[in-house]
Image (cartoon, helix red, strand yellow):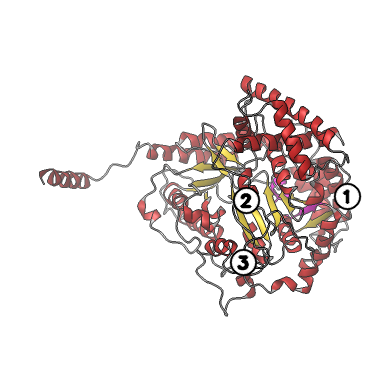
Amino acid sequence: MTSSHRRAAASVLVALTLTEAWVSNAPARSLVPARRHTNGNGDGAGNHRGVPSAPRGVSALLTGRRRRATLPHAAGAAEGSADDDVELTDLAEVKSVESADQSALAQRLAGGFGPTVWSEFGSLGSSLAERSAAGECDWGDEHGLVNLGQGFPDFSPPDFVRMAAVEALSMDCHQYTRPAGHPPLVKVLAERYSHHLGREILPMEEVAVTVGCSQALYVTMQCLVRAGDEVVLLEPFFDLYVGQIRMAGGTPRYVPLKATPGEKKGWALDVAALEEAMGPRTRVLVLNSPHNPTGKVFSEEEMAAVAAVVARYPQVTVVSDEVYKYTVHGGGEYEEGEAGAQASQQVVATTEMAAKMFDKLDVNNDGVLTKEEFTEATGEVVGVIGSPGEGVDHGAAAAGLAAGGIAPPRHVHFASLPGMFDRTLTLSSAGKTFSVTGWQVGWIVGPKHLVRDIHVALPFLQFCASTPIQQAMTGVLSKADQPYGGEPTYYDWLCAQYRRKAALLSKALKGAGLPVLASEGGYFLTVDVSGVAVPQKYLDETSDAISTVTHDWAFCRWLAIEHGILSIPVAPFYSADRRASGDCGSYVRFAFCKTDETLQKAAERLNKLGDVLRGENVPAEPAESVEMKKAVAGEAAVV
């Protein structure tokens, strides 16, 4: 086993040790799943650990065997089971239930083709932009609407990217290419991911090129998920996932990330909740790091904890969505300090000890431990570094790890963890990294037994992605490793730019009195607006895009209409159950993948918003209104 694999394996043991010790101090929490699964006889007595083996792949897709169930929850669940209750509750917001006049697709999507958060706020943005151009909006300056909503750059890609497109168009590559990927591009991708994952990637067997990452997600779900299967999502989640899961006949199962309190609020993975959501019907776990919409980057310790859970469910495939992998910037807010250095030394020492323990128990030297070996290793690690109460604060250590680690974050490829390559499909694309979201080039990397089905399915979706654009990406990926903009590589320059832009917008938001949660990657900031008193008329509105207008939804409409800043509410990134329970908080997403000029305009508007929220510079009421209020107050005093 290589040293990098030993270190990653050690991280699994550290995460297990610290997490289980933390949980052992909290009587109300348990790693044992609370819900029960049926054994197929409808008596609910199924063994949660009994994992049935089942064939997967595109055979069911091509023969149509899994298209019998019209709603995801209808297949494979016993009548009256808890699983039915969960799914029916999740569909409570759907106004148009399954009926004879619905299309087959509408039925798979558990409702009609109603508006979404994107169509709602896209329409609002267009309307406000037109009104502003016509002089109908008074936002106190000459600027039009400041759009920090949908996540795409409002600036051009680098010159070397555009020149690569020009060069590709001048070459003889205008006809169909290989459906699974243009050979020059898959070779470059295989070379890069061989380095990323620490193993040789076979270009023609373990790489597939798609029309953007959205198609990569779609074909992956079609190949992995069958009717009745469950797909675990960490929420808030990119809303595209749910529709694609249901179109494949699956049922989403949700695990909420926890907003961590304190001066530097962030997001934490709840390993116990993840364990509870997993079961014999789980087919896929979707990981998204850096995460949309929160900007969270899952640490190596968190990834190792996830790997430890996945290792116990051999039927589960992890879909790792890594489109923001080259934008891990840390938000410019990570400072290690003396306390951080001490914590780092303790974790390093623990990791080294765990690596030795791993090697001792990994008798097959294959980088994989059985459940029994994991349990034994975890127990011995606890014994070495001290049980709870013996000088090591496992609870604080686990909480610290879950909060994103004690050092600036870095991207961790889940497939690089011991034993996880054969269980993972890694998805990414060029759009976010090179500011070319319209190029629509995505890819999938994974073991050939999983990628094979994707190769078979792709020609049924389209014959191939654009040949000249794939050719252009071949040159772009090669040139991006060269010095750029005074930085060692283009990727270093990109992170530096986004670190600066994140800091600029974060400062403006905080200056307005809006608490900003830590963003470590991607190009979004999430803000807690629960303390903002939104005018009642916005709270009383209704929308076909959401069953009940939430506080963050109302805030975003108020912010756009009255203050000229477009943002996106986070409530639609949660399940309907979570929204109905009120457990999703009130968060708003702001995109900072914008020009400095756009961000400066946003800062000016936010400065004025801060004055309003603090009660400063509020427009004076007409004298007659003031007198009327005094008169009413006087009458009330007399009574």
Percent of width and height locating residue 591: 58, 45
Measured in 3D between alpha carbons, the distance from the residue under mark 2 to the one under mark 3, in whole angstroms, is 20 Å
Taking the spot 70% from the left edge, 46% from the top edge, the residue there is 309
Which quadrant is the N terminus positioned in? Answer: top right
Residue 431 lies in magenta, yes or no?
yes
Q: Are marks 1 and 3 in contact (CB under 8 Å)?
A: no
Mark 3 sits on what residue? 73
Kindly report which numbered mark, 2 or 1, lies closer to the viewer in this rendering. Answer: 2
Mark 2 sits on what residue? 33
The residue sitting at the bottom extreme is: 100
> Callout 2: 10 Å neighbours few (<14), some, many (20+)?
some
Q: Which residues are magenta?
A: 430-446
Among the two numbered marks 2 and 1 on one chain, the one whose residue lies closer to the N terminus:
2
> Callout 1: 10 Å neighbours few (<14), some, many (20+)?
some
- Secondary structure under tag 3 reads helix
Mark 1 sits on what residue? 187
Q: Quadrant of residue 228?
A: bottom right
Taking the spot 70% from the left edge, 57% from the top edge, the residue there is 280
Kindly report which numbered mark, 2 or 3, lies closer to the viewer in this rendering. Answer: 2
Front residue of 230/196: it is 230
Q: Which disc, if any, is residue 343? A: none
Where 119 sits versus 562, above or below?
A: below
> Callout 3: 10 Å neighbours few (<14), some, many (20+)?
many
Where 487 sits versus 521, above or below?
A: above
Among the two numbered marks 1 and 3 on one chain, the one whose residue lies closer to the N terminus:
3
Percent of width and height locating residue 184: 88, 52
Residue 361 lies in magenta, yes or no?
no
- Secondary structure under tag 1 reads helix
